[in-house]
Image (cartoon, helix red, strand yellow):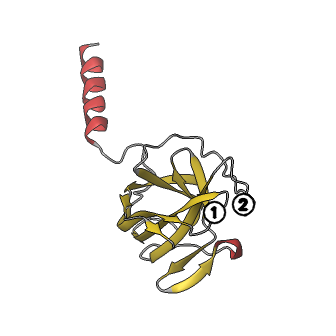
Amino acid sequence: MKYTILLMMLALVACGNNKNVGKASENVLIVHSLTKQDNFPGVESNLRFTRTYTCIMHSELMQSFQPQYLLVDSVQLPIKSFQRNGTLQLVDNGATINPGDTIQFITNRMYYNADSRNNILEEMTYASSGIMLADSLASLRCLTDSGVIDLSLGTIEARSSIYNP
């Protein structure tokens, strides 16, 4: 009985020291740049401003993946295309990111005035991401062979706003 308890304790200690227990693979994205910049239009309309998100990163994932959405705040912004090693790739065509690839993507979020009467533009609506991120954080929602995964991109750097005349 004494030895059974001792063996169980040793097994638990060994499992606690093994950092790979419960991990299928290491998921690593090296983010070189993650920025947001607000662009205010020069004409009066219901569009208050456009926020542009730009990300440049290098993939060291152990598997290929397809970027689907940038997650910010509580919404998911669609990624329609990206540059992989300098070549434009369309997400709708099934383009994937492989281990060792460097990619860049840009996506936008529109903010609207509720009471404008001039130049009414059709409002974009964004689906909920199902999570609430702090204002300065972002994640990348990807499709892999094993399903959908969310990868943290870290802190978003705010750039100076652009005011059009």
Quarter of the image with the N terminus in it = top left
Tell me if residue 159 can be seen: yes
Direction from residue 70 to residue 36 in the image, left or right:
left
Give the number of the disc on residue 123.
none
Answer above or below: position of 25 versus 9. below
Q: Give residue 112's position: percent from left, percent from top.
A: 63, 53
Which amino acid type is shown beneath numbered disc 2?
A: Asn
Q: Is residue 88 above or below residue 91?
A: below
Label 2: which residue?
Answer: 118
Mark with earlier residue (1, 2): 1
| Residue name at image x 70 percent, y 57 percent | 124
* Relative to 62, residue 89 above or below: below
Dot 2 alpha-carbon crowd within 10 angstroms: few under 14, some 14 to 19, many 20 or more = few
How far apart are the two marked residues, 1 and 2, measured between alpha carbons? 6 Å
Q: Are marks 1 and 2 in contact (CB under 8 Å)?
A: yes
Q: Nearer the viewer, residue 152 or 3?
A: 152
Of 143 and 4, nearer the camera is 143
Q: For the view shown, which residue lies furthest in the top direction?
A: 1
Q: Which mark is residue 44?
A: 1
